[in-house]
Image (cartoon, grey):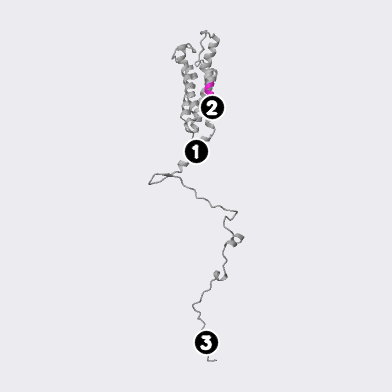
Amino acid sequence: MAGVARIPRSRGGVTGVLLILLGAWGGLAPFVGPYFRYAYTPDKAWAYTSGRLWLSIVPGAAALLGGLMVVAASHRATGCIGAILGLLGGAWFVVGGSVMPLVVTNGSIRPGSPLTGSVGSLSSATRQFLEQLGFFTGTGLLILFCASVALGRFSVVGVRDAALAEEQAAEAYAVPDPVTQDVTFPSVPSTPSTTGQFGAAASPFSPSSTSEQPTTTSEEQFPTTTSPFRRPPSDTTGLRGPG
């Protein structure tokens, strides 16, 4: 299973780039929004406040860092950590403005107030809704969506992941030739096929084995030997007398 943890770098390409863009927007929007009359108070470009730090810069940096990890991830754990960072940043964009007054009761960390007044065909209420949506709620929801998609893609083992794991396992067992530097793969000795409990060897008591084995005689099985102490029988014909 360790080899399946390796993933192609293109796995989180689209979602990672979106997380980078959304995180950059969430962190920079309070500073550049006043140029377009689209801002929270104080209505000054590049004005630093504690609210902008903890409610915009910090979650935006978390989403941006998570997007970078997702884009560059070649390991499943790295991509999951980056996606989780994106989830945390997106969730803080959504609920940070409501949670922070409960944690810091002196009111020093606040997002400010959206600008009021009609702009062109937009009424004051519509303008405030779009500012809330673009600075916090909408940006956070988009980051949550992209990070959830990235986390899902990194959590699932696909066919390409299994193929990549097989290639890496084959490369790990490759044996280079010391002379030609050709890479060969060690072959696994084939196991002889066996039939039954005692293998493919034929039993001496089976009919097939008896028919194939040549018939041997008792003389071939137990050849006779001549003892060196035994004298050959003497020729008695020469000792006989004539008829």
Q: Nearer the viewer, residue 232 or 211?
A: 211
Q: What's the amino acid at mark 1?
A: Ala
Secondary structure of residue under mark 2: helix
Label 3 vs 2, first from the N-terminus:
2
Q: Nearer the viewer, mark 3 or mark 2?
A: 3
Q: CA distance from mark 1 to mark 3?
A: 95 Å
Is residue 45 rendered magenta in the image?
no
Q: Residue at x 54, y 29 (%)?
A: 152
Q: Callout 1: 10 Å neighbours few (<14), some, many (20+)?
A: some
Q: What's the amino acid at mark 2?
A: Val
Q: Callout 2: 10 Å neighbours few (<14), some, many (20+)?
A: some
Give residue 45's position: percent from left, percent from top: 44, 13
Q: Residue at x 45, y 42 (%)?
A: 172
Label 1 vs 3, first from the N-terminus:
1
- Residue 154 seen from this side: yes
Which residue carries the number 3 mark? 237
Give residue 119's position: percent from left, percent from top: 51, 8
Look at the picture and state if 13 lies above or below 100: below
Q: What range of the chain is rendered magenta? A: 141-152
Q: CA distance from mark 3 to mark 2?
A: 117 Å
Which residue carries the number 1 mark? 165
- Magenta segment's dominant SS is helix
Which residue carries the number 2 mark? 149
Secondary structure of residue under mark 1: helix
